[in-house]
Amino acid sequence: MQLLVSFQHVRPPSRAGLGFLDLGTGRFRIVLELPPIGGRCDGLLGLARSDRMLFVSAGPFRHLGEAEPSLLIFRAEDLMPEARYRLNGFADLTDLEYHEGTLYVLSSGTGQMVAFRADRDRIEPVERFLWRPRLAVEGKADPALHALTFFRNELYVSASDRAGFDAYLFNVTRDSLAARALQDPRSLAVVGNSLCYAAGRFGAVHQLDADLSLRKSAGLEGNVRGLCAADDSLFAASTNEGRCVIHRLNRDDLSLEASIPIEVEGVEVGGMLPIEGAGVWPDPPEPIWFEMFGEPI
């Protein structure tokens, strides 16, 4: 089992795009680098995988005169690029979720979620599926959307209010507000019958009960995000003064089992995704080469 890690806010001289952490050996290696000239891309964020494809959200390719983010598609077995789509009208694609042939894409910048059919050779928008929180539609709040996951067969999205201090958990399936008064919920992960979230700038991981009330908390130093469950543990990434660490937590009581420093300077972790049977991935890393094409969608 390995953890795929994406990097955002990449600052020169670093070019780290994607990396692999082997949970058996503790070895970390970069598998994909960003373009060599600074300012070409803001970094990578959301990660999702189907049986055949790996989906990654990317910042704008500014050297190509683009202002919109991109959705990158790789072949899952060897990380070979398949396609790049520019998402016109969206900004800051913070998270992705693949579920039963559909790819859900979260746009924090516009406060919306859009769905694409992703069970064919190309992605296609799902007709009439564009979701915004009811609080935003009614003008009661301006939520920035952070993360999404399926919990008890229903789709949930975490968010924080741009104009205030409140933070929310929305049930998209029911189009309802599921919980509020959260702490900067930047990432979500399902552990058994509970939902956990990484509390960003509050430097913590919180576990919620089945009724979404707070059950347990664990403090971690730095800005915490990139939460995921893998190998019978819970993993969270923290960034503090340009230093990235991946923490292994006990899934039952959130006690700290190990902290693994990631020796990559000038980056922040964007997301993490467990990968099993990755196949032949580049070593040394491949440079990203989505320079010459990008179909608008």
Image (cartoon, helix red, strand yellow):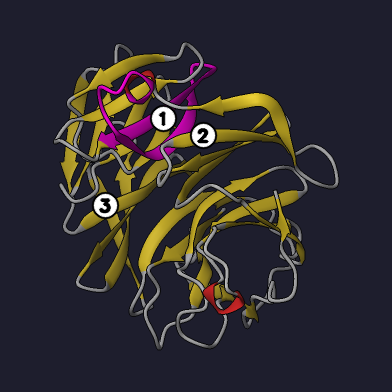
Horizontal and vertical percent position of residue 206: 23, 34
**275 in the magenta segment:** no
Question: Which sits earlier in the primary sequence, circle 2 or circle 3?
Answer: 2
Q: Amino acid at mark 2?
A: Met
Q: Is residue 123 above or below residue 126?
A: below
Horizontal and vertical percent position of residue 104: 59, 36
Q: Which residues are magenta?
A: 136-160
Write down the residue under mark 2: 113
Q: Is residue 183 above or below residue 28?
A: above
Q: Amino acid at mark 3?
A: Val
Write down the residue under mark 3: 224
Residue found at x 74% / y 61%: 279
Q: Is residue 175 left or right of residue 61?
A: left
Q: Confirm or deny contact between disc 2 and disc 3 (CB under 8 A).
A: no
Residue found at x 52% / y 50%: 273
Q: Residues within 10 Å of mark 3 (few under 14, many from 20)?
A: many
Q: Is residue 29 left or right of residue 223?
A: right
